[in-house]
Image (cartoon, rainbow, N blue to C red):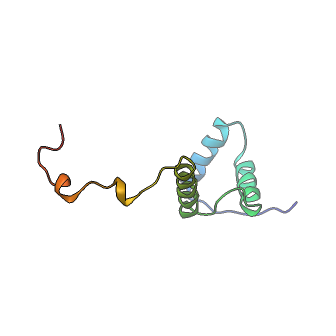
Amino acid sequence: MRNITVSLDDETYRLSRVKAAEIGTSVSALVREYLTALVWGQATGTEFDRLRQLQDRTLEDIRSRGAGLRMADNLARSVLYERDALP
């Protein structure tokens, strides 16, 4: 097993120690778990990747229910601009 050194600002380090203590582990264990999941494809590397995966799951869920956006589901332009259309 190899050791690595990671530099963090003081506040991030303090908060990471608090978070690790809350869940009963160490900062080293948190980093090890994250990196292991990352390299084996079980974690995403960026917030963008996480959001893209969430979007993909959401769209798949919509498709599996037979729902989606169809032109027939759109309101007519005249109905959209009626001032009294909403209660």
In the rendered view, would you say 19 is above or below 33? Answer: above
In the image, 29 versus 52, the foreground residue is 52
**Taking 81 as reference, is 52 left or right?**
right
In the image, 40 versus 83, the foreground residue is 83
Q: Quadrant of the N terminus?
A: bottom right
Q: Residue 52, image x and y in percent?
A: 55, 61
Q: Residue 4, image x and y in percent?
A: 76, 63
**Taking 69 as reference, is 29 left or right?**
right
Q: Residue 20, image x and y in percent?
A: 66, 42
**Taking 59 as reference, is 1 left or right?**
right
Q: Quadrant of the C terminus?
A: top left
Q: Residue 42, image x and y in percent?
A: 72, 56
In the image, 45 versus 57, the foreground residue is 57
Q: Residue at x 35, y 53 (%)?
A: 73
Q: Residue at x 40, y 58 (%)?
A: 70
In the image, 44 versus 75, the foreground residue is 75
